[in-house]
Amino acid sequence: AAMAPGKKITAKIKKTLPVTGPQAPTLSELMRWYCLNTNTHGCRRIVVSRGRLRRFIWILLTLSAVGLILWQCAELLLNYYSASVSVTVQFQKLPFPAVTICNINPYKYSAMKDYLSELDKETKNALETFYGFSEGKSKVRRSVGDGNSTGSEFFQQIPLLKFEDFSKMVTDLYSGQKRKMEGKVFHKDSSIVNSGDSNDIIGFQLCDANNSSECALYTFSSGVNAIQEWYKLHYMNIMAQIPLETKEKLSYSADDLILTCFFDGLSCDKRHFTRFHHPLHGNCYTFNSGENETILSTSTGGSEYGLHVVLYIDEADYNPFLVTSTGAKIIVHDQNEYPFIEDIGTEIETAAATSIGMHFTRSRKLSKPYSDCTETGADIPVENLYNKSYSLQICLHSCFQKAMVDSCGCAQYAQPLPAGAEYCNYKKNPNWMYCYYRLHEKFVKEQLGCQQICKDACSFKEWALTTSIAQWPSTVSEDWMLRVLSWDKGQKINKKLNKTDLANLMVFYKDLNERFISENPANTLVILLSNFGGQLGLWMSCSVVCVIEIVEVFFIDSLSIVMRRRWQKAKKWWNDRKRRQGGKPSQESELERQGHENPVCLDEDLPTFNTALRLPLPPESPLPRTPPPNYSTLRLESSSAFTEQLPDTLDVGRH
């Protein structure tokens, strides 16, 4: 069949013209074309260099440059989400922080002894049995009467034990009998080996109420630590059964705790304090809590312009087994933060003036992807039980309390109650002690997942404290100061004050310099692209156009050639199959033009200006030369040209 004229012209062009560049039929031809036409000099030198050594050197240099580019660009990408820290200091009027003050003794011992009578009796029996200690006549003020029983049957179930010779042979406090204990031993002190005398090792046993064979022995190298831990265990069980309103009455009022108050040189009173009940510290009082949307500020630094209070500690009414130190605890915090007085509180001594100077710092961290912090805590899958702004401590305590409720069926006394939960106590939850200790062990070992879930807050305020202590009152002023303070508060104290019952506290700004520490992105997209361009230009003399060219040749065109070759092979196989089915011989395919047959892929340098002058000319083009002059044009014409001469010239010639 005759071919159409248009198809004949197209076939003639395809057959006649060389196929080069991105339309080359082979990858080898495409790569050769790219190397000779690209702006990256190393690739071109690989193709045009003569000699294997020179070509090998250029290959090595080019690959090294590519490797350096990839390495440097990878470093740029990895460091893209890095942050730089800037510190700004400015002098201005500063808001005064909230200051929460607690007595170290949470409840008045005289008011609590009816609830703790049975527990105190067991504790005294332990001291007498293990250490031969009996209360002297000077301590009759703390005698324990026969109050209401608060669970003597549980003291029998969880008695204090005395371990002998580092073995599991123990002496039971309640029965006085020796027996062998079964269960895993947990040493609550740093090292049981350093205890010196094995007779000093005491502890207690906790067993699973549902499985009596599951027990854990908790031992202490210090008898003081063992007795206090055992006492606190039963103390929390008793306090969990007392209503909150009753506990608030058993603790200290603002009038009991605060004798005098001054702020910024002006007098203040209990109306400036907000009561806050802490499970472990009883009634605490927060100055400048912001409860009425009013936050005090100060415009002058120094001890004269801060908070100055005198606290009444009343050491004589301390619980002898619950606390072993005397004084108060304070914590400086933001109005929206929960005061974790038990974790980061600062202790204030009695008979001393404690000055606490503050430096205020605000910090701001970048959130994801720069750091693993949270803005508000809304993205943390842990319910906030404290009704305050998010912090890492709130998250950890809330996470543990949730795990406590889920695992033990009740809540731990020292933390807020989740919705619908109750505090653990012997009567309703006889297994809670064993469950709590095992759960707390997992929490410390980071096996509950709380440390992995909870994150730092991105924004937070911090008051760096500097504490100094001086004797107060002085020897010469002690008599009149105590007499005046007793007179001022005589209606509430009704006895002469002792300096060991008083604590003088001053909290103030050392200066009004606010330090703001912030993180800023160290890189932007413009800087990243500029760095990329610098690396490409330094190692490969390449630009963005060159990168686009690489993408086009090595990805688009190479893929096109591979797919075209596969298509041609598949098409040839299909045509051959049809011919064989029709009894016709297979058609031989034409040889494809190879790269070395393309005029553009010559294995030599392209000519420069100097080398082009020395190139031989083709034979059909003679060497151009300067033509010789036409001498015939220089000959004079015949004399006939001058026959028509003017008459005056002829006359001159005659003369």
Image (cartoon, helix red, strand yellow):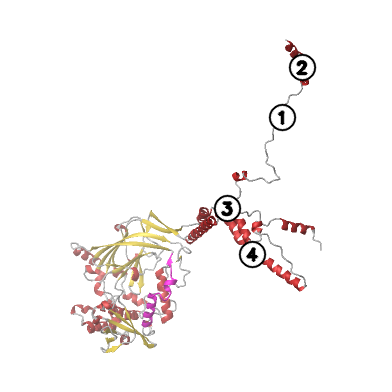
The CA distance from mark 2 to mark 4 is 92 Å
Q: Determine the residue located farthest toward the top in the rendered image.
A: 655
For the magenta stretch, what is the residue range? 433-457
Amino acid on which the number 1 mark rests in the picture: Tyr
- Lower sequence index among marks 2 and 4: 4
The CA distance from mark 4 to mark 3 is 25 Å
Q: Determine the residue located farthest toward the right in the rendered image.
A: 1
- Lower sequence index among marks 1 and 2: 1
- Lower sequence index among marks 4 and 3: 3
SS at badge 3: loop
Q: Position of residue 66 (x, y in %)?
A: 52, 58
Q: Position of residue 593 (x, y in %)?
A: 68, 59
- Lower sequence index among marks 2 and 3: 3
Amino acid on which the number 3 mark rests in the picture: Asn
Using the image, determine if residue 400 lies above or below residue 479. Answer: below
Local packing at callout 3 (Cα closer than 10 Å; few below 14, some 14-19, many 20+) is some
- Lower sequence index among marks 1 and 3: 3
Q: Nearer the viewer, mark 2 or mark 4?
A: 2
Residue 444 lies in magenta, yes or no?
Answer: yes
